[in-house]
Image (cartoon, grey):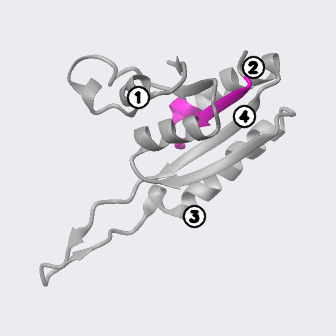
Amino acid sequence: MFKNVLFPVDGSPDALFAASTVAKLVKTYDSRLVLLSVVQPPPPSINAGGEKEPKPGGMNSPEAVAKLLKGAQTLFAQQGIEAEIIEREGKPSFIICDVADEIDANLIIMGCRGNGLTGQGAAESVTSRVINLSPCPVLIVP
């Protein structure tokens, strides 16, 4: 049923909380698990001369994302689940849907506080955009 499962991770408590649901589902259906993290380039800052300069990376740096993905992969390995990792750069909602399409995902599982799914925040929410653009079902773990 769920041959290929995509789990986008971002280091948030919501993603960590969703990991147990991911593990149960992947074990139940003997699914292939793909972990994805997206480096979103920070907007450039303006220096004293009025020129744009990239801001330092922080959690969006490729190094931090690689560490996050390796940690998530280890977490699943401790539960006997082999997980592939993919790191991409771009707008998270679009990249998540593109990767889901590329790997022929049958399901995307995402953690979410639920704050952005209704009202004014819905248009800005990565989760809402993924729900609307996804090529497959999306399971949201509140």
| Above or below, comparing residue 3 to residue 9 in the picture | above
Q: Nearer the viewer, residue 65 or 130?
A: 130
Where does the magenta region start and end? 3-15
| Amino acid type, residue under disc 2 in the picture | Lys
| Residue marked by disc 1 | 133
| Residue marked by disc 3 | 63
Is 76 situated left or right of 119 in this image?
right
Q: Nearer the viewer, residue 131 or 71?
A: 131
The mark that comes first in sequence, 4 or 2, is 2
**Mark 1 and mark 2: Cα distance apart in space:** 26 Å
| Amino acid type, residue under disc 1 in the picture | Leu
Assess disc 2: are there few (<14), some (14-19) or many (≥20) residues with their C-alpha within 10 Å of its C-alpha: few
- Comparing marks 3 and 1, which lies closer to the viewer? 1
| Residue marked by disc 2 | 24
Q: Is residue 13 magenta?
A: yes
Assess disc 4: are there few (<14), some (14-19) or many (≥20) residues with their C-alpha within 10 Å of its C-alpha: many
Where is residue 112 drawn, in percent x and y? Answer: 46, 25
SS label for mark 2:
helix
| Above or below, comparing residue 28 to residue 34 in the picture | above
The mark that comes first in sequence, 3 or 2, is 2
**Mark 3 and mark 2: Cα distance apart in space:** 29 Å
Assess disc 3: are there few (<14), some (14-19) or many (≥20) residues with their C-alpha within 10 Å of its C-alpha: few
- Checking the image for residue 33, the label placed there is 4
Q: For the point 49% across and 62% down, which residue is it?
A: 61
Q: For the point 57% across and 27% down, which residue is it?
A: 108
**Mark 3 and mark 4: Cα distance apart in space:** 22 Å
- Comparing marks 3 and 4, which lies closer to the viewer? 4
Where is residue 90 drawn, in percent x and y? Answer: 42, 52
The mark that comes first in sequence, 4 or 1, is 4
Q: Are marks 3 and 1 in contact (CB under 8 Å)?
A: no
| Amino acid type, residue under disc 3 in the picture | Glu
